[in-house]
Image (tube, grey):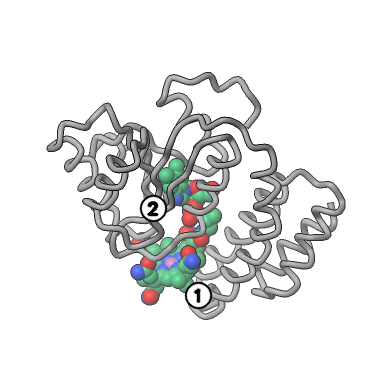
Amino acid sequence: MQILEVLKQSIIEGNEEHAARYAGDAIAERIDAKIILDDALIAGMNVVGEKFRTHEIFLPDVLLSAKAMYAALAKVRPLFLKEKIPSLGKVVIGTVQGDLHDIGKNLVGIMLEGAGFEVIDLGTDVAPERFVDEAVARDAEVIGLSALLTTTMPGMGKVVKILKERGLSGKIKVIIGGAPVNDEFCREIGADAYCFDAANSVATVKKLLGQSTSRAE
Ligand code: B12
């Protein structure tokens, strides 16, 4: 699919205008929103991440790519939210304290919303206590935590600890994700589940809540 490759390139190049236009074109070609997300948007950001890692590009370039990604995402997002299904439950989601990365977290939020969950997005740089306070105040069943920096990962453990201290472990489930996070870390801090990507987060949250995962997500 030519258009997905062009869209991916516009994200890698950080061309906001092109990204928005080509995302619109991909939608007009009736390409499935999930495929646009996976094969162009996320695929593009993965290339950006790799180029950044190898010092082929620098922080300002990454920011431009992030902006282009958001311009494309703004076009794709409504497709995920089209069919309003009765709420499957409430998820409070956010990026942990000290961390400003929000692309992955936003994708997870969109996927969950699209699947029928009510998503309460606390944004980035969220203090551990706030996750718990908001989850309690909003009667949420799940807290979703994102961290992209190894230095901010401990914030996830703090949320789990606060839940334990307040006797809420098990009642409010914690799902964690982000590039430096893995299963081992999840077990270490006592979170309920780790999820590698946005696509799997829907099935994982449903499983945590004892819901059937048979419906296509
Ligand atoms: C884009 C980016 C930025 C952008 C962020 C823009 C934004 N609005 O988010 C900007 C330029 C601002 C930035 C800043 C910095 N960054 Co940066 N950044 C990246 C980059 C290139 C891509 C991240 C991204 O968006 N990926 C695309 C998304 C789709 O993937 P994802 O986030 O992993 O999310 C997926 C999964 O992880 C999962 N997931 C994510 N969250 C959650 C949550 C839940 C609940 C679940 C279930 C799943 C889940 O699902 C998502 C979708 O499939 C990464 C490189 C990388 N390889 O990750 C570096 C990277 C994360 N950054 C890094 C660094 C060092 C920084 C800075 C400290 C740089 C600096 N010197 O200032 C600052 C920190 C600012 C801060 N305090 O947070 C390092 C971290 C190193 C480390 N080990 O800690 C990385 C790894 C780059 C590197 N190789 O050095 N960055």
Q: How many marks?
A: 2
Q: How far across and down, in percent of the image, does residue 199 sit?
A: 57, 39
| In-image side of 53 versus 64 (left or right) | left
Q: Which mark is residue 55?
A: 1
Residue under the point 68% across and 51% down: 78
Are dots 2 and 1 in contact, CB under 8 Å?
Answer: no
* Residues packed near mark 2 inside 10 Å, few (<14), some (14 to 19) or many (20 plus): many
Task: For the C terminus, give its image quadrant.
Answer: top right
Residue under the point 48% across and 21% down: 211
Q: For ligand 1, tell me if the residue under mark 2 lies within 8 Å.
A: no
Q: Amino acid at mark 1?
A: His
Asked which quadrant contains residue 192, the reply is top left
Ligand 1 image position (quadrant): bottom left
* Residues packed near mark 1 inside 10 Å, few (<14), some (14 to 19) or many (20 plus): few
Q: How far across and down, in percent of the image, does residue 173 sit?
A: 33, 33
Q: Amino acid at mark 2?
A: Gly
Q: How far across and down, in percent of the image, does residue 38 sit?
A: 65, 48
Comes first in the chain, label 2 or label 1? 1
Q: Is residue 157 above or below residue 124?
A: above
Where is mark 2, residue-wise?
Answer: 94
Q: CA distance from mark 2 to mark 1?
A: 28 Å
- Residue 44 visible (yes or no): yes
| In-image side of 7 versus 99 (left or right) | right
Q: Is residue 202 above or below residue 121?
A: above
| In-image side of 176 versus 104 (left or right) | left
